[in-house]
Image (tube, grey):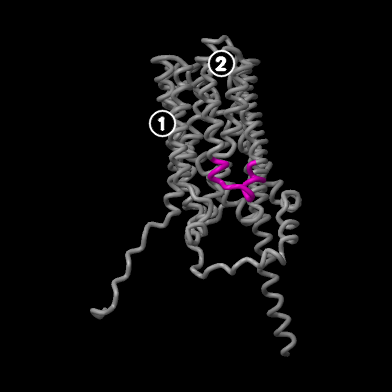
Amino acid sequence: MTASTPALAAPRLFYGWIILAACFLTTMMASGTMMAFGVFINPLAEDMGWSHSSLSATYAISSIVSGLSILGVGSLMHVYSLRMLFMIGVIVHGIGIYMTSTSTTIGAFYLWYGFIAALGRSVFFIITTTLVTRWFDKRRGMAMGLTMSGNGVGPFIFSPVVTWVIIRWDWQTAFVALGIVMTAVLTFAALLMRNHPHEMGLQPYGASDTPAAPPPPAAVNATAARVSNSVGSLWGTVLRNQGFWTLSFINFFCCVCHSIPLVHTVGFAQAAGLSALASALVLSLMGLSSVVGRIFWGMFADRHGARLTLMMTLFMQGSFMLWLVNTQDPVIFFLYAIAWGFGYGGVGTQYGVVARELYGARLFGPGYSGQNCFAMVGMAVGGFLGGYLFDVSHSYVSAWLLSFGAGFISSLLALDLLTQGERAKAAQAAAAVEPERTVSAVRH
């Protein structure tokens, strides 16, 4: 380099990593407030006299409301700012969690936790997944794994902390603390978010540096754009996609599978003789192990494909449920937490990546929100049936077997999705070879 050659400026930090940090905080807080519900069940049952079935119904209502709300959010994401939708969700969710502490009847508990808090929570996971797919073209599996690792860190932190607050004070104080902390942290995350890299003059991570062609003149294409991008048109295209239905039913059975242990492992561990704090630590360890799983399986998916990874982790998540049948030994509880969390952690990481493969950028909002609606219904069914089966049989064995069966079905459906992808690749390869054969035949 000559003296007259200017020094190259040091590359600045890619803002996508800041987006990733904001998404991690979001998933950590959202899962912390949602997955910590299991530690509230016994204190609420003892203090308020509510049955396990009625408390499980709260979780079911919450999941259904979230699922239905996600449909609306997915349809609005291409019209309104993600940051605006996100901040509305933060406010509504914070009000719901705080007001849950004032509940004196099961009806009020259903309203504030099952409806209002869930309404706000519905924006968190779909917006974080959308932001990751917008900001990362390459290493998307790793980025999704880092984001979704917040789903494990949240329960790891909040389960024992909330249990300690309940023991030290009461469940009302625990909900107040959750509401305040959640609102503060997610407001900070919202300030870091940006809707799209193009807003900052950037390309997604790993995308070509060649700037995209400018959009065609609005006056010429306004009518065509309105037709092709209308909500009805987008949904019509998604619903005709075979992969959408397969992925949606995978989501349903997967969530039936893992909602049962997420909601009821703490109660089962206490019934088996563990203390309240030790039982919360089992749930906490499940969350910590899932963090390792999310990162590992995210990198694995980058190398071997998200569909194969989804099938493998779904099978692990379901099969490890058999460990809990008639378990009494505390050591087995903690070994189960490590093994199950590792498999469970890889499942949620793949859904956003597979959805982007299936739908592309244009259809991602409605497609991903649609499959998430199925997921939330699965969470409702599993969470409620776990409590109902306990009330009927006074045992969790049937709940664990139901979880295993649902997990096995989801893994078979994921195998079908994998073969769909392989058939599509083979068809594309054949279509690419056919023109070459035609040209060769003409020459000869």
Within the magenta stretch, is there residue 79? yes
Q: Is residue 404 visible?
A: no
Quadrant of image for the N terminus: bottom left
Query: Mark 1 Cα within 10 Å, few/some/many (few <14, many 20+)?
Result: some
Q: What residue span does the magenta drawing correspond to?
A: 73-86
Asked whether, in this view, residue 181 is left or right of residue 309, the answer is left
Residue at image point 42% right, 26% down: 281
**Residue nearest the viewer, comparing 378 with 188:** 188
Asked whether, in this view, residue 98 is left or right of residue 239, the answer is left
Kind of residue at badge 1: Ile
Residue 103: assigned label:
2
Whether 194 is drawn above or below 138: the answer is above
- What percent of the width, then of the height, locates residue 76? 65, 45
Whether 350 is drawn above or below 213: the answer is above
**Residue nearest the viewer, comparing 80 with 378:** 80
Residue at image point 44% right, 33% down: 184
Residue at image point 67% right, 73% down: 432
* Furthest residue in direction front, as rendered: 219
Whether 72 is drawn above or below 55: the answer is below
Quadrant of image for the C terminus: bottom right
Asked whether, in this view, residue 129 is left or right of residue 420, the answer is left
Asked if the residue at tag 2 contacts the one at tag 1, i.e. Cβ–Cβ closer than 8 Å, the answer is no
Kind of residue at badge 2: Ser
